[in-house]
Image: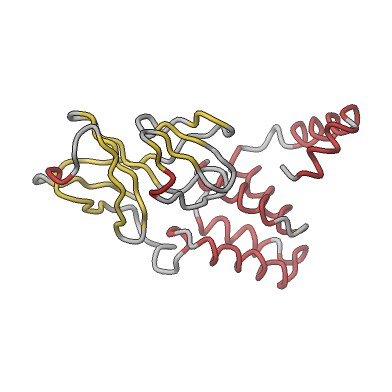
Amino acid sequence: MSDALNYLIKARPEAMNHYFSFLKKAGEHLDVRTRDLISIITKVAVQTEAGFKQYLNRALNNGATPNEVLDALLMAFPVLGLAKIVWATDILLAMDLPEFRPESLNASVSWHDLAPLAEIPPDKISFIERDGRNLYIYREGDAICVYDSRCPHQATDIPHLALDGKRLTCPKHNWSFDITTGACTDVGNRPLKRFEHKIEDGHLLASW
């Protein structure tokens, strides 16, 4: 939420609380993914970059595909116009989300070889790059967790230097995560994205 909206909530709570209640009620019969896609369009309409990034990431986390996001933007062309769609596309390109790369748009989910299991030390956090993604891997005995390095807030790529022990903190808005569980422990309320994994022929694989 912007500083301006936070200010108005404090200065005029009686009016702003009704406004947010209206927004919530207005979409109560829509599924979450549809609400998120509509929210993306509204953020593009008013060209709010932070809001666009936030709802884009929320839509992806709630099951929307990159193609559905692009379709939603193009379907809104009569309202948005080409200039605003290009504005949103420029932000998408700057974010460099793997899902939106042209070669990934129509690709099916597949398994990616991360590393030989012997190279993933137990009780430690490993940071690796594979096939265009940065990943955090936590191993405790036979239990393994593979996390996307991108913050679930606005998809900021959280660098390895942001790791302090088992606490990972996004440098942009200070969302903090417990790398052993992926849970958000401070500021935010959504966990790190976790990828399905398997062990095959002594190698750790993850799917996306």
Is residue 145 toward the left or the right of residue 44 in the image? left
Q: Position of residue 152 (x, y in %)?
A: 51, 43
Quadrant that contains the N terminus: top right
Q: Is residue 71 above or below residue 171?
A: below
Please report the residue visible at 71 percent of the width from the left and 61 percent of the height from the top.
76
Is residue 58 toward the left or the right of residue 50 in the image? left
Q: Position of residue 204 (x, y in %)?
A: 19, 45
Q: Position of residue 69 (x, y in %)?
A: 57, 56
Please report the residue visible at 75 percent of the width from the left and 64 percent of the height from the top.
80
Please report the residue visible at 37 percent of the width from the left and 61 percent of the height from the top.
107
Q: Quadrant of residue 162?
A: top left
172 or 182, nearer to the observer: 172
Please report the residue visible at 19 percent of the width from the left and 34 percent of the height from the top.
122
Is residue 109 toward the left or the right of residue 178 in the image? left
Q: Is residue 81 above or below residue 206?
A: below
182 or 31, nearer to the observer: 182
169 or 193, nearer to the observer: 169
Q: Position of residue 91 (x, y in %)?
A: 60, 63
